[in-house]
Image (spheres, rainbow, N blue to C red):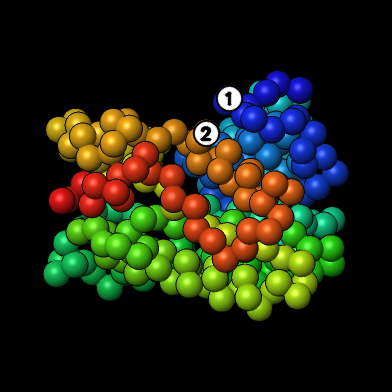
Amino acid sequence: MPRFPGTPFRDDLFEGQVALVTGGATGMGRSIAHAFAAHGADVHILSRNEEHLADAAASIEKETGRKVAWHRCDVREPDQVEAAFAKLPRLDHLVNSAAGNFVVPFETMSRNAWSTVVNIVLNGTFNATRAAFPLLSRQGGTVTNMVATYAWGAAPYVSHSGAAKAGVLNLTRSLAVEWAQFGIRLNAVAPGPVKSEGATKNLFADPALQQKIEDSVPLRRFGTPEEMALAVLYLASPAASYVTGDCLTIDGGQWLSNGLFS
């Protein structure tokens, strides 16, 4: 089986286990799904777009030799989420990667813009995590939520996303306490600036802004989706068996220098 780029993990790390990634057809979610498949897991991906789902599944199968099951699902819709999870034979790892974000000043933000992002990020995480519980509680497992450093800090023009991800971070920690008795560990990953098609288009399309972001990072570069995926694998792996309720920041040290807008 082909190795995942930069992986320190053995190829069969998740052999016999099932991982589901929301938002798994594009961006970081797609890399996370690829990483689980490359390390032996049976992978399921959720997204609203069938074309993206089919393309991601075919690409991951080509790279890893493992089939990826895909399910068209809007995480904002509880009935769709529950129907998707009902198709799973078991579940060991859930990654809530579905997200929506775009730059807009709060004073001009529409109610629809606010509710769209909050519904995807916060309510979508609630819907998927709740649907996963009956499966995860059978044998224990992990939930990893994708947040952002501004979930506890701040960033202008993404207040809808910041508020939603702050809610996800609190939910992660609250359920880490509640669900420890079931052998379920919950953690979060907070990526710094990562170049993906969606993020570049919606958040930093201007080359001058991209340069400013790089200058704000002590490591002087953007992160990669593959680096974020490997962080998720770590948190899901036995190496992190005593880690729960934590948030792993992966931003090249940007938070140490007070971020982009210092």
The answer to whether 128 appears left or right of 254 in the picture is: right
Please state the horizontal and vertical placement of residue 15, each as a whole percent of the image: 82, 40
Quarter holding residue 135: bottom right
* CA–CA distance in space, label 2 to label 1: 7 Å
Q: How crowded is mark 2: few (under 14 residues within 10 Å), some or many (20 or more)?
A: many
The answer to whether 24 appears left or right of 20 in the picture is: left
- Residue at the image point whose x is 69% and y is 74% from the top: 179
Write down the residue under mark 2. 226
* Helix, strand or loop under label 2: helix
Write down the residue under mark 1. 5
Q: In this rendering, is residue 14 above or below 137? A: above
Q: Closer to the N terminus: mark 2 or mark 1?
A: 1
Residue 200 visible (yes or no) = yes
Please state the horizontal and vertical placement of residue 236, each as a whole percent of the image: 67, 50
Q: Residues within 10 Å of mark 1 (few under 14, many from 20)?
A: few
Quarter holding residue 105: bottom left
Q: Tags 2 and 1 in contact by the CB under 8 Å rule?
A: yes
* Helix, strand or loop under label 1: loop
Q: In this rendering, is residue 53 above or below 73? A: above
- Residue at the image point whose x is 30% and y is 45% from the top: 254
Q: 134 and 176: which one is in front?
A: 176
Please state the horizontal and vertical placement of residue 31, each as a whole percent of the image: 56, 37
The answer to whether 227 appears left or right of 58 in the picture is: left
The answer to whether 23 appears left or right of 68 in the picture is: left
- Residue at the image point whose x is 35% and y is 65% from the top: 152
